[in-house]
Image: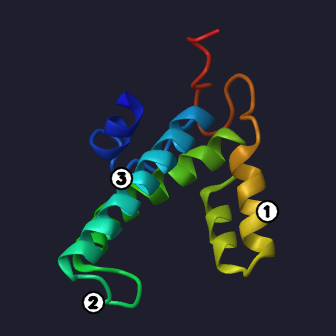
Amino acid sequence: MDLVIQALTKKYATFTGRARRKEFWLYTLVIMIVSVILSIIDGALGLADSVAPGLGLISLIFTLLVFIPGLAISIRRLHDTDRSGWWVLLAFIPIIGSLVLLFFLVTKGTEGENRFGADPLAGEE
């Protein structure tokens, strides 16, 4: 949980460096769980579909708050696989782009230092 808090505070808009798989996927899991809970709350309060189809007011605010850290951690995750952060734009290519990006995000990071910084797992082994 510390990794998620760190991604939302200290590394809110940090696009440099590397993020290991655990950090990225734990952040993704927590954000997804919170999003589902907030969508349920939106529905219970009658706020669903008041702003945009399928998105209530509370969910919209949360989505806007976590957009930048989500983008930053995705780019740092790509850096861990020794890829440029620009690869995140693959998400705009329907189906194929998202699948390729998913493959990049689940791939093990490069061992040792790469052009984006030190190995985030170096101290744990």
Identify residue type, mark 3: Ala
Q: Which callout, 1 or 3, points at the residue further toward the start of the chain?
A: 3
Q: Name the secondary structure under disc 2.
A: loop
Q: Disc 1 versus disc 3: distance between alpha carbons?
A: 24 Å
Q: Amino acid at mark 1?
A: Val
Indicate the position of residue 85 as horizontal and vertical percent values. Answer: 60, 57
Name which of mark 3 and mark 2 comes first in the sequence.
3
**Residue ID for mark 1:** 100
| Quadrant of residue 82 within the rendered picture | top right
| Residue occupying image coordinates x 36% and y 81% | 55
Query: In x, y percent, where is residue 10?
Result: 29, 38
Q: Where is the N terminus found, in terms of image quarters?
A: top left
- Foreground mark, 1 or 3? 1
Near-viewer residue (113 or 46): 46
Of 13 and 3, nearer the camera is 3
Query: Of the residues tagged 1 and 2, which is closer to the observer?
Result: 2
Residue displayed at 32% across by 89% down: 49
- Residue 22: image quadrant is top right
Amino acid type, callout 2: Val
Task: Residue at 61%, 20% (x, y): give it.
Answer: 121
Q: Quadrant of the C terminus?
A: top right
Q: Is residue 65 left or right of residue 3?
A: left
Location of residue 120 by image quarter:
top right
Identify the residue at image location x=28%, y=63%: 65
Q: CA distance from mark 1 to mark 2?
A: 32 Å
Q: From the image, tell me which residue sits under label 2.
A: 51
The residue where tag 3 is placed is 13
How many numbered circles does the render carry? 3
Tag 1–tag 3 contact (CB < 8 Å): no
Q: Nearer the viewer, residue 37 or 20?
A: 37
Between the residue at mark 3 and the residue at mark 2, the CA separation in whole angstroms equals: 26 Å
